[in-house]
Image (cartoon, rainbow, N blue to C red):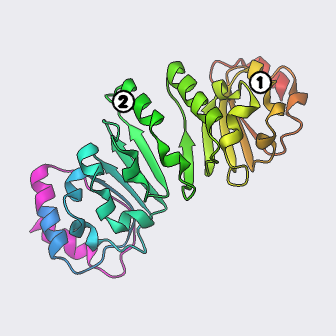
């Protein structure tokens, strides 16, 4: 009865939810799915967080208004990633996020999702991530448009990614890029990012690599360059060519250094 009462609340045509997260026992999920499948009332929610139990068949998500739904996060594994193409509602999102502990075995399964984020749990083996990156031809899809790309991994994996970047002749369209100083070793590393699409870059770096920033013309055209560092730049004039700049100092950065820099 409580679930029926809850669903009756959702049936209010004036209801507008900013976020709905369905996290409960499998028994309760079964009851909720039955209610969803019986309902002919669209639920208007902007952000939806669910797990793979709601991916068993596409009809389960028909209860959500596809014009209102902008972001979906799904906790799932490779088995359910294989059926994502059956969910047309997921292909129209502003952002679709997959949280997984196993890397997708077939990147082509993700071609139809233009705005995609993949988050790996700690249990996802580094060798799996590395294998996935090597075969990630999804980046070569000219229709791909990424809202945000963060590259944080081991140094061995970074070396592999840098090699892939330097060999590629396909531009990646991404709006926000988060990297560290290893990707600032030479300007050619960033040549694969489309400079018209790229609007914001955040870099974790040190004074040594801040000296190299002027060599990266792509960084001078940004709407915002953010530098996160544990040491204040020794020469502020190195930053004159960056018209929109944000500094974020780690706790280890001495207050006296920050004061002198300011």
> Would residue 177 be seen by someone viewing this image from the given angle?
yes
Q: Quadrant of residue 178?
A: top right
16 inside magenta stretch: yes
Is residue 59 left or right of 16 when viewed as pictured? left
Rendered residue at 25%/50% (across/down): 80
In the image, is residue 142 above or below residue 213?
below
- Closest to the observer, 220 or 253: 220
Q: Considering the image in quadrants, where does the C terminus appear?
A: top right
> Would residue 249 be seen by someone viewing this image from the given angle?
no
In the image, is residue 17 above or below residue 55?
below
Q: How crowded is mark 1: few (under 14 residues within 10 Å), some or many (20 or more)?
A: few
Task: Find the distance from the CA under tag 2 to the CA under tag 1.
Answer: 41 Å
- Closest to the observer, 258 or 211: 211
* 2 and 1 marks in contact (CB < 8 Å): no
What is the magenta range?
Answer: 1-30
**Which mark's residue is nearer the viewer, 2 or 1?**
2
In the image, is residue 6 above or below residue 39?
above
Question: Where does residue 134 sit, x and y in percent of width and height?
Answer: 47, 33
Rendered residue at 55%/30% (across/down): 161
- Closest to the observer, 88 or 12: 88
Question: Where does residue 224 sit, x and y in percent of width and height?
Answer: 73, 46
Q: Quadrant of residue 129?
A: top left
Q: Circle 1 sits in a helix, a strand or a loop, which is it?
A: helix
Q: Considering the image in quadrants, where does the N terminus appear?
A: bottom left
192 inside magenta stretch: no
Q: In which quarter of the image is residue 196?
A: bottom right
Residue ID for mark 1: 258
Is residue 24 left or right of 186 when viewed as pictured? left
Question: Where does residue 16 sit, x and y in percent of width and height?
Answer: 39, 72
Question: Where does residue 204 sit, x and y in percent of width and height?
Answer: 64, 28
Residue ID for mark 2: 128
């Amino acid at each position: 009865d409580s679930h029926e009462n809850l669903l009756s609340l959702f049936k209010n045509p004036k209801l507008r939810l900013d976020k709905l997260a369905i996290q409960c026992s499998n028994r309760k999920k079964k009851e909720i799915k039955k209610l969803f499948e019986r309902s002919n009332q669209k639920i208007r929610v902007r952000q939806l967080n669910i797990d793979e139990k709601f991916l068993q068949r596409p009809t389960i998500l028909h209860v959500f208004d596809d014009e209102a739904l902008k972001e979906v996060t799904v906790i799932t594994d490779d088995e359910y990633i294989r059926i994502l193409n059956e969910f047309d509602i997921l292909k129209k999102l502003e952002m679709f996020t997959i949280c997984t502990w196993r890397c997708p075995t077939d990147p082509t399964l993700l071609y139809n999702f233009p705005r995609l984020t993949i988050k790996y749990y700690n249990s996802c083996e580094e060798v799996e991530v590395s294998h996935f990156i090597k075969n990630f031809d999804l980046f070569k899809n000219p229709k791909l448009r990424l809202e945000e790309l963060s590259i944080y991994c081991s140094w061995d994996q970074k070396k592999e990614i840098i090699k892939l970047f330097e060999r590629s002749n396909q531009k990646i369209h991404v709006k926000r890029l988060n990297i560290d100083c290893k990707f600032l070793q030479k300007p050619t590393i960033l040549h694969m990012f489309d400079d018209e699409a790229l609007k914001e870059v955040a870099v974790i770096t040190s004074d040594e690599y801040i000296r190299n920033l002027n060599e990266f013309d792509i960084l001078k055209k940004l709407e915002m360059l953010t530098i996160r560092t544990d040491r204040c730049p020794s020469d502020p004039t190195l930053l004159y060519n960056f018209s929109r700049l944000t500094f974020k100092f780690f706790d280890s950065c001495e207050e006296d250094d920050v004061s002198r820099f300011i």
